[in-house]
Amino acid sequence: MTVCDAPGKVYLFGEHAVVYGEPAVPAAIERRATVSAEPRGDDHVRVEAEDLSLDGFTVEYAGGTEVRPDVDVPTPLVEAAMGYVDAAVRQARDAANAPDAGFDITVESDIPLGAGLGSSAAVVVAGIDAATRALGNPLEPRELADRAYHAEYEVQDGQASRADTFCSTMGGAVRVEGDNCEPIDAPNLPFVVGFDGGAGDTGELVAGVGKLREEYAFAADTVTAIGDIVRTGEDLLADADPGGDPSPATLEELGELMDFNHGLLAALGVSARSLDTMVWAARDAGAHGAKLTGAGGGGCIVALDPSDQTETALSFTQGCEVTFRASLATEGVRVVEP
Ligand SMILES: Nc1ncnc2c1ncn2[C@@H]1O[C@H](COP(=O)(O)OP(=O)(O)O)[C@@H](O)[C@H]1O
Ligand SMILES: C[C@@](O)(CCOP(=O)(O)O)CC(=O)O
Ligand SMILES: [Mg+2]
């Protein structure tokens, strides 16, 4: 059995706009999805995904339960829930030139699902890595990231950027603009995450921004303005001490840009009352800045605060179910068991 894990991420800046060719800067965080893959003697794929719960529905394929559907004979619900795992298996089969390879797959994750922390990318990256290694065909990081992107692209109906999957593969902070993906230096940013317990539908939210962008020139300008924020923010990161603690002035300015970015995302219709409430609670508590992260609609916000105040305030904020400090994951995908 081969086991790999891969981190989730927060967006410092640039989600949604990145889908239209603007740059984005996501940063990997120490919350991981762990996927194990064991080749089978037949061409079936059996998936145990114990944490799979979305919109109040929980799919449990835990060992011993008789309801263990094969993903190659899916009901629509299983198909929706298992789409990313299924796409990862297809990529692994293709990469290893083993179209009939079967697997027993298990997924365990401490990344909330559909909440903007890139659970889908982490599952796909760790899944492709584990499955290709199990077939004796390990991939170079860039090929792995590319295949993971294609898996997300397929599941999200052609509306995905390379940002989540490249970040999860490489770890650290990265910059993605169209097909150009590069790791970048970043200081040790004091991320605090607030989670409303909910989820957003990435495909639907991305499509909503796309529609606005076609309908209104000012919505297209808003997307471009998000790109300008990213370009300003990456200069700040480049000037900071890599891996060191950022100066108060740098935090202040990064925070201001995050606040601006959140406002523009809200204008594009992807925030939610719960996200706005958490953003304001963080700002009121003294965070340097706060914004939603990922697709939005519900899920997580990320704030910058080296003190405990934002975490404490969020823990008392109605509508915030979970809050935690998220440290930068310098390592991307890893082999846990070869
Ligand atoms: N632990 C898990 N087990 C199985 N599938 C998962 C797991 N975590 C995430 N996924 C897949 O990823 C989807 C959520 O991805 P997405 O909507 O892009 O949100 P995000 O990437 O922000 O978490 C889930 O519906 C599921 O298909
Ligand atoms: C909205 C988007 O920019 C980020 C989605 O992030 P997440 O899946 O919500 O973590 C879409 C994408 O880049 O593929
Ligand atoms: Mg995702």
Image (cartoon, grey):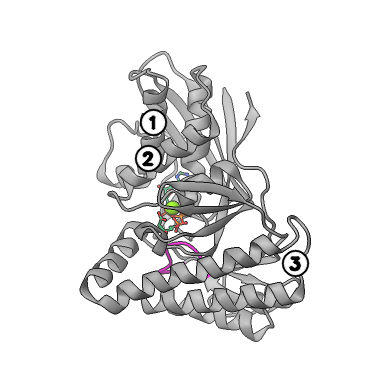
User: 328 or 135, which is in the foreground?
Assistant: 328
Query: In the rendered image, which quarter is residue 68 located in?
Result: top left
Q: Is residue 5 left or right of residue 65?
A: right
Amino acid at dot 3: Pro
User: 87 or 64, which is in the foreground?
Assistant: 87
Q: CA distance from mark 2 to mark 3?
A: 36 Å
Amino acid at dot 1: Gln
The residue that appears at 53% across and 76% down in the rendered structure is 319
Which residue position is annotated with label 3?
A: 246
Amino acid at dot 2: Ala
Residue 127, image x and y in percent?
Answer: 49, 34
The correct choice, above or below, for 219 with respect to 152 in the image is below
- The quadrant of the picture occupied by the C terminus is top right
What secondary structure do most residues of the magenta stretch adopt? loop
Chain part drawn in magenta: 292-298
Q: CA distance from mark 2 to mark 1?
A: 7 Å
Which residue position is annotated with label 2?
A: 151
Residue 43, image x and y in percent?
Answer: 35, 19
The residue that appears at 37% across and 40% down in the rendered structure is 150
Closer to the observer: label 3 or label 1? 3
Tell me if residue 157 can be seen. yes
Secondary structure under tag 3 reads: loop
